[in-house]
Amino acid sequence: MAASTMPHHLALLLLLLASPAATRLASAACASEKFPAGRAYATCEDLPKLGASLHWTYDASKNSLSVAFVAAPAAPGGWVAWGLNPTGEGMAGTQALVALAGSGSAAPTVRTYNITGYVPLGKASTPLDFPATDLAADAAGSGGKIRVYGKLQLRKGMKAVNQVWQVGASSTGGAPDKHAFQADNLNAKSKLVLAGKAAAEAPSPAPAPEAGGPAKSSGGAAGSDSGAASSIAPSKSPNAAVAAAGVSAPALLVLALVGFLATV
């Protein structure tokens, strides 16, 4: 190999090995989630805390956001919650969907809470500022996870919003009990980008397989009374041409290595 071309190929290999796109391709665990028939989402993101993930489709023409939040309760019989906070990063102001684990084979119960302050939540749902429909939940996720589904009617022109998620260990009388106050609980927050470059580059999950649908609930979802709020930042996807070609990160590295050796 000519001395002048060797540094070029070595640099290419190092760039591929260090590429954030390659890392995202290898770690997009949320894309393997298998939903019931009729449930598929354009984008998914592994959330940075509490082992949770969010799957969503945003219809800008209708200002509607369809979501599936997936997480395991802190203990069997506990609850999971996800919500949007258009007013800040704390819990107060969050429009929350909460799923409480059902007893035995019963489906989780979904409740909605407009969390106006740091007070215990009751058994009854409260209306959200973002009208919620298509509420349902199931416990078919792996590792004891609960999946809560819903569609929110957002305000016109929203492009990004703070997102909050949480898990709890128990409920009392149909109301979620307080969650833990560990670092992961208090930092379960990020920004959900709905429109713009970051949203357009977010990775898409695999198509949903055919299966039986989850049991629907006429209730809403619940939040907890801790100060943990959240916002999610969807990670950017790899180069669109690479994604369209369906080339995995390991394959990219192999191809680069073959090209490197072929020029020796």
Image (cartoon, rainbow, N blue to C red):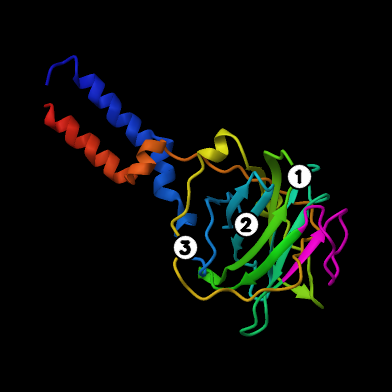
Mark pair 1, 2: CA separation: 16 Å
Mark pair 3, 2: CA separation: 14 Å
Residue 109: x and y in percent read 71, 74
Picture layout, residue 139 above or below residue 13 = below
Picture layout, residue 21 above or below residue 83 = above
First-in-chain label (3 vs 2): 2
Q: Secondary structure at mark 1?
A: loop
Q: Mark 1 is on which residue type?
A: Arg
Q: Look at mark 1 in the image and give the residue it sits on.
A: 155
**Cβ–Cβ under 8 Å for marks 1 and 3:** no
Magenta residues?
Answer: 110-131
Picture layout, residue 73 above or below residue 15 = below
Mark pair 1, 3: CA separation: 28 Å
Quadrant of image for the C terminus:
top left
Residue 244: x and y in percent read 37, 43
First-in-chain label (1 vs 3): 1
- Furthest-front residue in this view: 61
Labels in figure, total: 3
Q: Mark 2 is on which residue type?
A: Val
Residue toward you, 148 or 75: 148
Q: Look at mark 3 in the image and give the residue it sits on.
A: 208
Residue 10: x and y in percent read 25, 26
Residue toward you, 11 or 40: 40
Which residue is rendered at x = 33% and y = 34% of the image?
16
